[in-house]
Amino acid sequence: MDVNFRKIDIDAYDEDVISEGELYEADPRDPGQVLEDAKAKAAAVRSSLSKGDMAGALGTILDSPPFGANVEDAKNLTLQTVVTVLNSTKSADIPNVVKSLTPEAQDTLMKYLYKGMAMPGWGDVSGSVLLGWHEKLTDVAGTGCIVRAMTDHRLV
Amino acid sequence: MSPEVYNVAQTPITGHAFNADRSQVAVSLNSNDVQILSRSGNEWTTTETLSEHDKVITSIDWAPNSNRIVTSSQDRNAYVWQQTPDPLTGRTIWKPTLVLLRINRAATFVRWSPFEDKFAVASGARAIAICSFDPDNDWWVSRLLKKPIRATVLSVDWHPNNVLLAAGGADMKARVFSAYIKDVDKRPAGSVWGEKLPFNTICGEYTSPAGGWVHAVGFSPSGDVLAFASHDSTISIVYPGGPTIYTIRSNTLPYVTLTWTAEDAFVAAGHDCQPVLFTGSQSGWQSAGSLDDTSAPKSSGGARGGLGGASPVGRLNSLAYTTFRNADSRGLAQSPGGAGSASPDGDLFTVHQNTITSVRPYAGQPGAVTKVSTSGVDGKLVVWNVSAVGSLTTRLGAARLG
C-alpha cells in the first residue's frame, strides 16, 4: 500500500489549525526576567551545594523552571545546574532527596531527566547518573510522573 | 464481595450500555455492529445485532425510560434505535432513525440527556451536536456547539437540569456549555454555573496543570461539581464558585473514564486496568483505593474458567512479554521443561487484563450508586461493588504491616 500520503502536512491546508503556543499558558515573565531568575537560582544552588544541602538545591532549581519559546539561554543554564546537582549527589542519598521534593518538582525533575537523556555528551550529562535518578524517581512518583513529563507541552 | 466478571469477547469492547432493568446490554465489539446481549443465567448471549453504520461504532447509550438506543460512529452518523413491530412479520425489531448531525469528521461519543428528549454527540469536527426530535419531519435535528472548541471532543456529560453539558477533548480543556434548546427545554433555574444560559454559553473552562487530552468529564449527582480526567494522569475536581480546583496526581497510568457514585465519591478507571474510588468534599479530595484486589493473580477465578487457553488478544501483558521481562529483570531463563520456576501465564493481577475504556453506574440511584460496570480492551464486562473498596484498603494495610 502506498503510505506516502501520511507524510502530507495536512495542517497546511487548515485555516484554523491549533498552534503549539495555544496548547499551554505562556510564562507571564518576559525572557530577560526568566534568565535573571535562572542566574539567581543557579547562585542559590551553588551556596546550597557548598553546605551539602542537596534536597534544598534541587528544590530551588526545580521551582518555576523556564519553559516555552525564546528562553534558550535560561533553559541551558537551568539544565546545567540541575545536572550539577544530580552529579554531585551520592547515590545512597537519592531516594531521600527525591522524597523531599514536592509533586510539582518531581514532575519537573522527570522532564530534565528525559531532556538530559536526549542530549548525550552535552556538558556534564552522564547517562548512568540520569538512569539512576530515573529509577529512584519512578519508585517514588510512579509511572504517572513519566506520563506527565511526556504529556506536558511546557517543554523545559 | 468479589466482582462479577463476564468474558463477552476476545476483541475490545468499544462501549457498553445496559437497559433499565439490567437484563440486556448493548455492546459494540470494535466493529460496525451493535450487539444486544441478554442475560441467561450467568452468561450473556447475543440476541440481536443492529447493523446500519458502515464504519466502526464509537459510543452507545441506552435511555432507561424511553427505551431507545443511540449509537455514534466513525461514519459521521448517529442513529436512534427504537423497538417497533415489523410491518411484515409482526416481530418486534429495533428500527434505526438517522440523525442529521451535519459534522464532517467522526462522531466520538454520545449520551442521552437526563430527560431523554435530547442527546449530545461529540465529534472530531471540533463540535458537539445537540440533537432533538423534530416531529413534523420525523427525524432528529441537531444544533452545533462550536466555539471555542479547538480539537476533537472526546467525552461529554449532562448536568441533571437537562441543559448544561460538560465536554472534554484533545484541546486539553474541560468546558461547561449551555445546550439550551428553546422548543424543548423549560428555562432552567440559575445554578452555580450561571443564571442566564442561551445556547452555547460557556459557563466554565478548565485545564489540568500539565495539560493533556481530557478523556472523561462528569457532573456530580447535584450537578454542582465537575470532575475530569486528563492524559497527564491527573483527576481534577472543580467547584465553580471560586473556582476551587483540586488536582490529584496519580502514580499510575492515565484514567480515561469516570462516573460519580455519590455527591462525595466517584470511580475512575483507565490504562491502569483497575477502577479506583475517589472521595472528598469541598475541603479536599483523595484516592480511597482500588475496587480490585490486586494482591494475587486472578487465574483461578471461576468466571474465567471454560475459556482455558484463551487467546491473548486484547491482553496488555502477553506471555512473551512476561518471559522476556523475567529474563531481563530477574535473570530467569525459561527453557522447555525447565526446573524450578512456575511458568507465569502473563496475567496481570487485575481483573481487567487491559485498559478499561468505560465505567458506568449499574445499581442504585443517582447519588447512591452501589455498583458500577466496566468494559475494556480485553473484552471483559465486569460489575463491581462500590463498597468493596473498604475491605480492600484494610487488607492492603494488613499486608503492609505483615
Image (tube, coloured by chain):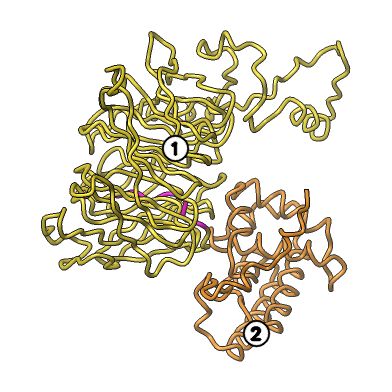
Chain colours: A orange, B yellow
Q: Is residue B137 left or right of residue A68?
A: left
Task: Tell me if residue B87 comes above or below residue B307 in the rendering.
Answer: below
Quadrant (top left/top right/bottom left/bottom right) for the N terminus of chain B? top left
| Tag 2 subunit | A
In the rendering, at what x and y percent does residue B238 appear? 33, 58
Query: Quadrant of residue A59 in the image?
Result: bottom right
Residue type highlighted by circle 2: Asn
Q: Residue furthest bottom?
A: A32
Quadrant (top left/top right/bottom left/bottom right) for the C terminus of chain B? top right
In the rendering, at what x and y percent does residue B178 appear? 25, 61
Q: Name the one closer to the observer, B138 or B28.
A: B138
Task: Tell me if residue B39 comes above or below residue B256 in the rendering.
Answer: above
Which residue bears the numbered disc 1?
A: B358
Mark 2: secondary structure: loop
Query: Quadrant of residue A34 in the image?
Result: bottom right
Mark linked to residue A70: 2
Give the magenta-colored segment's residue range: B213-219
| Tag 1 subunit | B
Specify the principal SS of the magenta part.
Answer: strand
Q: Name the one closer to the observer, B318 or B80.
A: B80
Q: Is residue B83 left or right of residue B47?
A: left
Q: Residue at x 44, y 37 (%)?
A: B358
Q: Is residue B160 left or right of residue B393?
A: left
Mark 1: secondary structure: strand
Same-subunit check for callouts 2 and 1: no
Residue B203, magenta (yes or no): no
Task: Tell me if residue B348 comes above or below residue B129 in the rendering.
Answer: above
Q: Residue at x 47, y 39 (%)?
A: B53
State whether residue B393 appears in this view: no
In the rendering, at what x and y percent does residue A95 appear? 67, 51
